[in-house]
């Protein structure tokens, strides 16, 4: 659902929440569809046509993707990885107390060098960090026998 308007505050419990904006309020419940208040706005609202295939059971979809080779809708490279990156950037901003200008290609905060300690770590002697060309996520590779 698209709702244009600034969110001023949030009220409610886990069972019901509201988003109050300049043009109305959206009520969201754990057990029913979102509602727009005033009711006249709800009646005027047109739901967008579905454009993402619906998934009945993500476990079965995952097994089907293994069996057929067709990517699951939760594909890490197409969707989930990017979503996780955004969520982790929020954590990075909270930990540093700064707005983050993110360079996703190089996995660096352009404006916040102190964030590097949260993005990359120093590995113990004998381990090194490397990346596979097709992937952006870091992998560990053993460089020598354990001591």
Image (cartoon, rainbow, N blue to C red):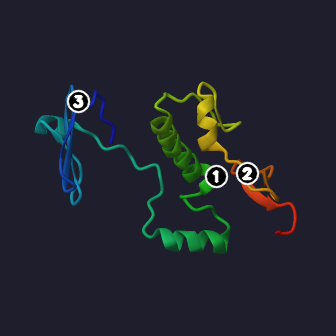
Q: Distance from label 1 to label 3 (Cα)? A: 35 Å
Q: Distance from label 2 to label 3 (Cα)? A: 40 Å
Dot 3: few (<14), some (14–19), or many (≥20) neighbours within 10 Å?
Answer: few
Q: Position of residue 136 (x, y in %)?
A: 71, 47
The label on residue 77 is 1
* Camera-nearest label, 1 or 3: 3
Residue 43 location, quadrant: top left
Dot 1: few (<14), some (14–19), or many (≥20) neighbours within 10 Å?
Answer: few
Q: Position of residue 61 (x, y in %)?
A: 53, 69
The residue lying furthest to the front in this view is 147
The quadrant of the rendering that contains the C terminus is bottom right
- The local secondary structure at tag 3 comes to loop
Whether residue 25 is situated above or below residue 140 in the rendered picture: above
The label on residue 8 is 3
Q: Position of residue 114 (x, y in %)?
A: 60, 32
Q: Are the two marked residues, 1 and 2, in contact with CB atoms closer than 8 angstroms?
A: yes
Q: Distance from label 1 to label 2 (Cα)? A: 8 Å
Residue at (63% x, 29% y) in the render? 113
Depth check, front residue: 65 or 16: 16
- The local secondary structure at tag 2 comes to loop
Q: Earlier in the sequence, mark 2 or mark 3?
A: 3
Depth check, front residue: 95 or 56: 95
Residue at (61% x, 68% y) in the render? 65
- The local secondary structure at tag 1 comes to helix
Instruction: Report which residue position mark 2 lands on.
Output: 135
The quadrant of the rendering that contains the N terminus is top left
């Amino acid at each position: 659902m698209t709702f244009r308007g600034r969110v001023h505050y949030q009220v409610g419990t886990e069972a019901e929440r509201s988003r109050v904006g300049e043009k109305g309020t959206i009520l969201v419940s754990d057990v029913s569809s979102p509602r727009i208040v005033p009711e006249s706005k709800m009646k005027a609202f047109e739901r967008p046509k579905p454009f993402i295939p619906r998934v009945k059971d993500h476990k079965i979809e995952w097994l089907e993707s293994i069996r057929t080779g067709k990517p699951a809708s939760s594909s890490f490279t197409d969707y989930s990885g990017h979503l996780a990156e955004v969520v982790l950037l929020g954590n990075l901003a909270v930990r540093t107390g700064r707005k983050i200008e993110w360079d996703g290609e190089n996995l660096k905060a352009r404006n916040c060098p102190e964030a590097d300690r949260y993005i990359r770590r120093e590995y113990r002697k004998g381990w090194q960090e490397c990346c596979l060309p097709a992937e952006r996520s870091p992998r560990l590779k053993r460089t020598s026998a354990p001591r």
